[in-house]
Image (tube, grey):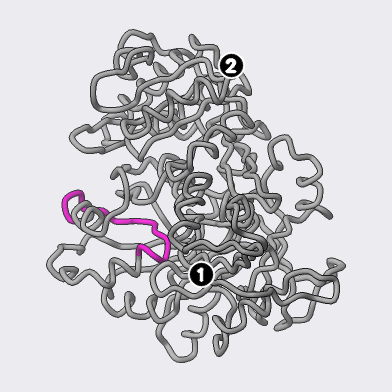
Amino acid sequence: MMQLTLALHRARRIHPAKTAVVFAGRRWTYSQFADRVARLAGVLADLGIGPGDRVAMLSHSSDRYLEFFFAAFWVGGIAVPVSTRYAQPETAFLLQDCGAKVLLAGDEFVDMAEAMRVEAPGLRHIVYAGEGDTPAGMIDYEAAIAARAPIPDARRGGDDVAVLFYTGGTTGRSKGVMLTHINCMSNSFGGMVHTKLGGELIGLHAGPLYHAAAGSRVFTNTMLGATHVVIPRFTVKGVLEAIQQHRISFVSMVPTMMTMILNEPDLDTYDLSSLRLIGYGGAPMPVATLEALMRRLPQVGFAQAYGMTELSPACTYLEPADHSLDPDKVHRLASGGRAIVGCDLRVVDTDDNDVPVGQIGEIIVAGATVMKGYWNQPDMTAEALRGGYMHTGDAGYLDADGYVYVSDRIKDMIVTGGENVYSIEVENAVLTHPAIRECAVIGVPHPLWGEAVHAVVTFKAGQSAGADDIIAHCRQRIAGFKCPQTIEVRDAMPLSQANKILKTALRQPHWAGRAKAVN
């Protein structure tokens, strides 16, 4: 049976003394890492977590985040990473929706975790996973592990759900994406095949581990028996210092991070000679930025993964060999690569019929990385997985060699800095402002984030509000990255014959002259 904990069993047996995890001043061998996971699993079992139960974590990245994932699997439960960027109402909804019994909380989120006792009444226990003194009423992470004997692995796997990654919703509410052990391991196998990664890897976790793109690297690196180096959150200097200090050979980033690295004035002062591969994905990559990085870091290979949370998260790879400045191949840098092993990728019309090579349609995917479904959303699951294919909502085309090119989004979604923002979530927040009559949210080009959230509004008769006031109003209701960065006021919205707001007309002035309607 495919089960994620097998990676930990294997690594412990093959090289027990090898460094598994490095975080701040802490280092754990694979023997120690596995022991801590089995002890934490025992703590979770004592707190009522059993097969299929949900345990959540709200924290910046750390060694304890890796232990949380594997301990949840070890006890037979489901890991639920919580976005650190969520506003309090969003966190409460997530915990209520998934029915988490236990929450692990980091230092910066103690107050929000405490508020969840009231707002998420199904929550029974809070484990303090920070670095300071344990707050009253919470369980001390390290003390609990030290006092608990290891327990046997529950050996859950296969089609059992391993992780619930929450993502924005087209209906205005976030939805839990159910990824199974098969899903996650198949994604890892695909990454290994297409990037040629091996166990000598020293990998840096620079992105937030609540995100599927970053979280999935935890499973791949462990399956390889590689060394994990974790930093709490992304900063340019933090990444460059970690590469230099720990001799990092692989790091995965979203394009925004890569742009910030490229623009770092002190980049050449760091020793990056150990770096062999940069993986990227989560948002479209500007070709000019990629070419500039390839020239700046000639000893480094690059690999792009295209996909979405529902695909665990990759369905294609643009392999290192495809990252070429050769005039005959350079056009491929604009593509998302080709389908990974074990996946079938098609481009179809509105009736799910294949369209000819070069013609734009919707990208759909079948294979072992396709999610089990949306948590407690059977109708939404059936719609997304109709015909046995995940309907991505991305528009694109295939070339004669099977490379996919993403050109637009069918779903009303914005990708800003690697984070998905569904327009309706933002519109619902804006429309609760007492002065707003209508609102349409679109993505507009941004030089660093790829796209920025832009709200077009009309006011009620006799009402008005400033942009700062509208944005501040939204920040009380949704995560900061979802809030509009800019506000445009109109007297009236462009409407279709069916009296629906024409977002294509609103987007056109911002995207005119560009080859793609996404960045």
Amino acid residing under circle 1: Pro
- Per the model, the C-alpha gap separating discs 1 and 2 is 40 Å
The answer, for residue 229, to whether it is visible in the render is no
Residue positioned 62% across, 73% down in the render: 404
Where does residue 103 sit, x and y in percent of width and height? 47, 24
Do the CB atoms of the residues marked 1 and 2 lie less than 8 Å apart? no
Q: Please report the bounds of the magenta region as a residue range.
A: 244-257
Quarter placement of the N terminus: top right
Amino acid residing under circle 2: Gly
Q: Nearer the viewer, residue 329 or 117?
A: 117
Residue positioned 76% across, 56% down in the render: 389
Q: Nearer the viewer, residue 296 or 62?
A: 62
Residue positioned 27% across, 71% down in the render: 299
Residue positioned 43% across, 19% down in the render: 126
The answer, for residue 116, to whether it is visible in the render is yes
Judge depth for marks 1 and 2 and give the one in front: 1
Residue 468 on the magenta span: no
Q: Could you say whether the residue bearing mark 2 is in a helix, strand or loop?
A: loop
Question: What residue does disc 1 label?
Answer: 284
Sequence order check, earlier mark of 1 and 2: 2
Question: What residue does disc 2 label?
Answer: 50
User: Could you classify mark 2 by the number of other residues whose Cα lies within 10 Å: few (under 14), some (14-19), or many (20 or more)?
Assistant: some
